[in-house]
Image (spheres, rainbow, N blue to C red):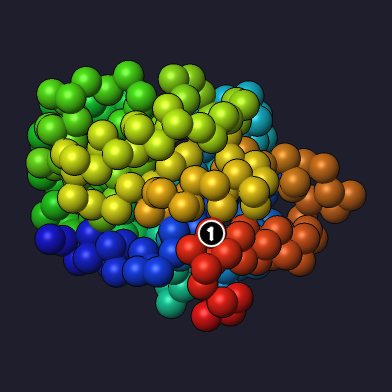
């Protein structure tokens, strides 16, 4: 197990589901996104930070728009890596971006720089589990975990492949679509998590469409983690001052963690 994978796995609590919030690096600017991450960090178990990209195929309109604003503001991958470095000492940082960005930077150079910044893992939605061995090897050599994704449409054969290659945690996409859509927490989602658990040994975190503490608690009753992304971006957009909404984000993150504790009957603050 790589250093990054071990750090991520250790961050998942044994008695409740992990809370994994998402921040778009550079939205609305680099300094503000760093402040948002610092506000949310004390209530997070793992922190996901997006590197803005011009063709984000897995992102819904909310995150797409945030990424475009970050690009328009001049945000570059190096800025997000510097953010990660500033966040050392907090929860493990997992970056999310797309494969073309890694190829443009050079996988070996990118992952070595990421490792020096303290990055624990990477999520690359457009890197299929049966492709990109050179990228995965470069990440492994640098000690950065490559976090795979699985969707409800993932076949049992591909789920087994994910199980053999998963590191840190496995990101379970709750719906067959992009981020930010409507989510139904029901028996189908529970069965999907159970099917993944039969093939994958890493913790299983569910994302896409989680908005409320109640949804987080319902999923946290049977998954190992919940990822909240678009809802945090919406809160930043709706704030009268998007650069100074850290206290509001922190209060929301605290409510999410309390809901995850309640789902497993863990006392608040423990």
In which quarter of the view is residue 188 placed? top left
Q: Looking at the picture, how far across and down is residue 60, in whole percent?
A: 57, 25
Q: Residue at x 24, y 43 (%)?
A: 197
Task: Indicate whether 234 appears above or below 20.
Answer: above
Q: Looking at the picture, how far across and down is residue 154, in whole percent?
A: 27, 22
Residue 191 visible in image: yes
Q: Looking at the picture, how far across and down is residue 24, in whole percent?
A: 57, 45
Q: SS for tag 1?
A: helix
Residue 44 horizontal side relative to residue 253, left or right: left
The residue lying toward the viewer, choosing from 22 and 219, is 219
In which quarter of the view is residue 262 placed? bottom right
Task: Indicate whether 48 appears above or below 39.
Answer: above
Q: Looking at the picture, how far across and down is residue 20, in whole percent?
A: 48, 54
Residue extending furthest toward the bottom? 270
Sort mark 1 into few (<14), some (14-19) or many (20+) by Cα contacts within 10 Å.
Answer: many
Q: How many marks?
A: 1
Task: Indicate whether 14 appears above or below 140.
Answer: below
Quarter of the figure that contains the N terminus: bottom left
In which quarter of the view is residue 256 placed? bottom right
Task: Indicate whether 171 appears above or below 99.
Answer: below
Q: Residue at x 30, y 39 (%)?
A: 194
Q: Residue at x 30, y 44 (%)?
A: 170
Q: Residue at x 19, y 30 (%)?
A: 159
The residue lying toward the viewer, choosing from 268 and 10, is 268
Residue 243 horizontal side relative to residue 229, left or right: right
Residue 70 visible in image: no
The residue identified by callout 1 is: 263
């Amino acid at each position: 197990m790589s250093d990054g994978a071990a750090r991520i796995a250790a961050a998942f609590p044994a008695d409740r589901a992990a809370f994994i919030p998402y921040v778009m690096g550079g939205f609305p600017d680099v300094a503000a996104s760093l402040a948002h991450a610092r506000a949310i960090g004390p209530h997070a178990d793992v922190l996901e930070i997006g590197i803005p990209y011009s063709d984000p195929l897995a992102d819904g309109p909310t995150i797409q728009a945030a990424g475009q604003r970050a690009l328009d503001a001049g945000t570059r991958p190096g800025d997000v890596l510097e953010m990660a470095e500033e966040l050392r000492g907090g929860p493990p940082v997992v970056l999310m971006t797309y494969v073309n960005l890694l190829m443009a930077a050079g996988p070996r150079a990118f992952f070595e720089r990421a490792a020096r910044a303290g990055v624990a893992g990477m999520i690359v939605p457009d890197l299929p589990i049966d492709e990109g061995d050179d990228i995965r090897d470069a990440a492994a050599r640098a000690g950065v975990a490559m976090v795979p994704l699985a969707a409800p449409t993932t076949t049992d054969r591909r789920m087994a492949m994910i199980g053999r290659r998963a590191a840190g945690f496995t990101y379970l996409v709750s719906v067959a679509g992009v981020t930010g859509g409507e989510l139904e927490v029901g028996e189908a989602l529970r069965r999907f998590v159970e099917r993944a658990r039969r093939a994958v040994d890493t913790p299983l975190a569910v994302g896409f469409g989680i908005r409320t503490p109640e949804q987080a608690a319902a999923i946290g009753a049977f998954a190992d983690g919940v990822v909240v992304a678009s809802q945090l971006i919406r809160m930043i957009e709706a704030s009268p001052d998007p650069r100074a909404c850290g206290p509001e984000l922190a209060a929301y993150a605290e409510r999410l963690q309390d809901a995850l504790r309640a789902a497993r009957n863990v006392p608040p603050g423990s």
